[in-house]
Amino acid sequence: MADKIKVLLTEEEVTRRIGEVAAEISRDYAGRHVHLLCVLKGGVFFTCELAKRLDLSVSLDFMSVSSYGSGTQSSGAVRIIKDLDEPLEGKDVIIVEDIIDSGRTLSYLIEILKKRNPKSIELCTLLDKPERRVKKEVKVKYTCFTIPDEFVVGYGLDYDQKYRNLPYIGVVEV
Ligand code: IMP
Ligand code: MG
């Protein structure tokens, strides 16, 4: 049977907010080149929508990571499934993520990427669930939406690899 999905954020709300965050980033990085790192797969829809709205010189790179650990609990150790194509040396980097939950994945990823000597490195996320944060040191510079502790899908986020293509953010009703 098909899952029932309750809309949490409509396509219009998401699109409008991405525009606002893109404008903020464009102001903060005015006159500079920004290197966006998309964390696959969940970050891909957000990265595209954000990149289109940046009034800046932009380049893109992609990486895919998998966190070790059982079930829904990420352990924090991250295995790189697909590494970046280009070096980060001297670049103004923004990591683009779908959601920050415990923060374990990002905390580990940032440590790895800092060793590659970017000029700067910041974090931009579509969604943040601060109630779930374990790694308090993960500082998110740009957040589109802060949401309660609910499991959400759509706009890149999956439930068992499904629903990434939904143009809105929803909660799967069980
Ligand atoms: P963290 O290491 O606990 O922060 O793990 C974050 C990752 O867990 C995200 O990049 C997502 O892939 C996944 N995740 C966390 N919460 C959700 C959710 O509500 N829906 C879908 N995926 C989620
Ligand atoms: Mg993710």
Image (cartoon, helix red, strand yellow):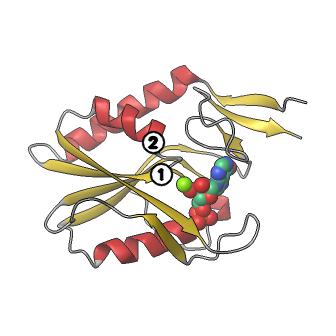
Q: Residues within 10 Å of mark 1 (few under 14, many from 20)?
A: many
Q: Are the residues at dot 1 and dot 2 in contact (C-beta closer than 8 Å)?
A: yes
Assign a secondary structure to mark 1: strand
Whether label 1 lies within 8 Å of ligand 2 gets the answer: no
Left or right relative to 81: residue 24: left
Out of 171 and 72, give the one closest to the viewer.
Answer: 72
Answer with the quadrant where ligand 1 appears in the image.
bottom right
* Viewport quadrant of the N terminus: top right
Residue type highlighted by circle 1: Leu
Residue 135 in the image, given as x and y percentages of width and height: 55, 74
Q: Residue at x 47, y 46 (%)?
A: 43
Residue 33 placed where, x, y %? 14, 48
> Is residue 171 shown left or right of residue 53?
right
- For residue 44, the mark is 2
Instruction: State the mark number for residue 114.
Output: none
Q: How many marks?
A: 2
Q: Residue placed at 22% from the left, 39% from the top?
A: 26
Q: From what the image shows, is residue 20 above or below residue 160?
A: above
Q: Residue furthest left?
A: 31
Q: Which quadrant of the figure contains the C terminus?
A: top right
- Residue furthest to the top in view is 12
Along the viewing direction, whichever of 173 and 134 lies nearer the viewer: 173
Q: Element under label 2? A: helix
121 relative position to 15: left or right: left
Label 1: which residue? 40
Identify the amino acid type marked 2: Val
Picture coordinates of residue 70, whole percent (x, y): 74, 72
Residue 23 occupies quadrant? top left
